[in-house]
DNA sequence: AATTCGGACAACCGCCTTCGG
DNA sequence: TCCGAAGGCGGTTGTCCGAAT
């Protein structure tokens, strides 16, 4: 038997054995017994090396399947239940920055998986883009999110918490945000425990509807080290950005003074003048009202998810502890 | 009561990157 | 440096279940 023929026979045998293994592999929904096997094995031996883990644990699954089941479902720190308002806001915010980088977005939502966030985006956000008859990636839809939905979310978060001041304290980091009697809003820097003072503007902005500024606005600077955006608001302007309401007292977007718009524009390399910016905003407001008015309970269905202030605070604390965002 | 439809989410697939031999 | 295995990621599909007809 020459070498070529021998190699071919060996290859055929390997393929045959591989096919037998494939035929033996389970697919589809996991059953309780499989979950228990996987949990027990990981509890004893830890995770990783998924292919050998699957074999050693006696699971007739691919390593990939085991990894996915563990990461998306069985992990003890997987957070289940409705996506909160705060999480929605964060998802919209981060997606506007990074697009479909689900795993990256998931890093900032403790306990949520990339799969879950992806599903949320596809089932909720894309659905509403469809209702508005526009592409989810279009500038029109992005601006609708930026100027209308996100400020509304912030307001609902504020309404749900009913708070005028919030303070969080932890062993490793301390932050505080203070609302004054005139509803002005200040965010102090925090100490992360290793003598690093970190700018908290981004969290402050996301925690108070009156100072909400979006990344599309000129108040954003991208940090080259982390490729994460930091928000910068002129100290004198903090707390002065108000929301706009239509005739029915429904929130339709942020309202800024001309000095605020000028401040933003000055930091946007003059890409937008105050007037054109205001006109652009107004055109989106008009467009949105026309469309959403024709769709009953459009906004409500988009936003109708419970809030969990405690988790939001916990998450902020975790972000602070990680020393990043 | 049976069927259809749509939302939610779990799971799979294929491609790409990383890592170790 | 090359190559194969493993892991990671985003897109897509499958399944379940409740609401509507």
Image (cartoon, coloured by chain):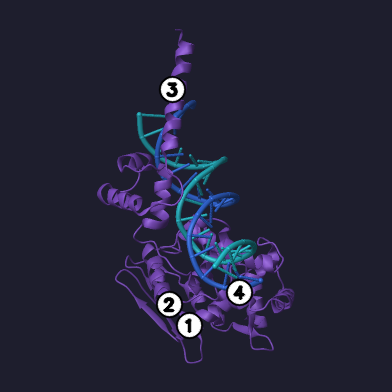
Chain colours: A purple, B cyan, C blue
Total of numbered circles in the picture? Answer: 4
Residue A80 falls in which quadrant of the image?
bottom left
Residue A272 falls in which quadrant of the image?
bottom right
How would you rate the neighbour count of disc 2 (Cα within 10 Å): few for under 14, some for 14-19, many for 20 or more?
A: some
Residue B20 x %, y %: 36, 35
Which residue corresponds to the image point at 47% horizontal and 81% vertical from the top-left?
A: A186
Tag 2–tag 3 contact (CB < 8 Å): no
Query: Which one is earlier in the sequence, the residue at label 4 or at label 2?
Result: 4
Residue A302 falls in which quadrant of the image?
bottom right
Tag 2–tag 1 contact (CB < 8 Å): yes
Q: Chain of mark 3?
A: A
Query: Which one is earlier in the sequence, the residue at label 3 or at label 4?
Result: 3
How would you rate the neighbour count of disc 3 (Cα within 10 Å): few for under 14, some for 14-19, many for 20 or more?
A: few
Q: Can you say which quadrant of the picture contains the N terminus of chain A?
A: top left
Q: CA distance from mark 2 to mark 3?
A: 59 Å
Say what secondary structure mark 2 lies in: helix
Q: CA distance from mark 4 to mark 1?
A: 16 Å
Q: CA distance from mark 2 to mark 1?
A: 8 Å
Query: Which one is earlier in the sequence, the residue at label 3 or at label 1?
Result: 3
Q: Chain of mark 2?
A: A
How would you rate the neighbour count of disc 4 (Cα within 10 Å): few for under 14, some for 14-19, many for 20 or more?
A: many
Q: Chain of mark 4?
A: A
Choose mark 3 or mark 1, whichever is in front: 3
Q: Which residue is identified by label 3?
A: A13
Q: Which residue is identified by label 4?
A: A149
Q: Which residue is identified by label 1?
A: A160
Label at residue A309: 2
Query: Which one is earlier in the sequence, the residue at label 4 or at label 1?
Result: 4
Q: CA distance from mark 3 to mark 1?
A: 64 Å
């Amino acid at each position: 038997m020459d070498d070529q023929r021998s190699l071919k026979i060996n290859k055929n045998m390997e393929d045959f054995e591989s096919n037998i293994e494939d035929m033996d592999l389970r697919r589809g929904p996991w059953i309780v017994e499989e979950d228990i096997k996987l949990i027990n094995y990981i509890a004893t031996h830890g995770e990783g090396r998924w292919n050998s883990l699957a074999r050693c644990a006696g699971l007739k699954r691919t390593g990939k399947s085991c990894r996915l089941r563990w990461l998306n479902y069985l992990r003890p720190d997987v957070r289940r239940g409705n996506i909160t308002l705060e999480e929605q806001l964060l998802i919209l915010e981060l997606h506007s920055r990074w697009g479909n980088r689900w795993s990256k977005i998931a890093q900032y939502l403790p306990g949520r998986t990339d799969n879950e966030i992806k599903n949320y985006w596809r089932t909720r956000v894309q659905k509403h883009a469809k209702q508005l008859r526009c592409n989810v990636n279009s500038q029109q839809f992005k601006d609708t999110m930026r100027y209308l939905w996100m400020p509304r979310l912030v307001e609902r978060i504020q309404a749900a918490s009913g708070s005028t001041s919030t303070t969080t304290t932890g062993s490793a980091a301390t932050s505080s945000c203070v609302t004054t009697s005139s509803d002005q809003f200040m965010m102090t820097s925090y100490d992360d425990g290793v003598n690093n003072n970190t700018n908290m503007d981004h969290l402050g902005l996301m925690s108070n509807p009156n100072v909400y500024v979006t990344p599309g606005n000129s108040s954003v600077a991208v940090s080259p080290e982390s490729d994460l955006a930091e928000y910068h608001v002129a100290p004198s302007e903090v707390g002065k950005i108000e929301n706009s309401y239509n005739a029915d007292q429904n929130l339709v977007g942020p309202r800024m003074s001309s000095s605020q718009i000028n401040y933003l524009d000055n930091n946007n390399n003059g890409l937008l003048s105050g007037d054109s910016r205001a006109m652009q905003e107004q055109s989106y407001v008009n467009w949105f009202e026309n469309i959403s008015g024709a769709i009953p309970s459009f906004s409500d269905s988009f936003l109708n998810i419970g809030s969990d202030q405690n988790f939001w605070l916990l998450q902020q604390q975790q972000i602070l502890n990680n020393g990043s965002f």
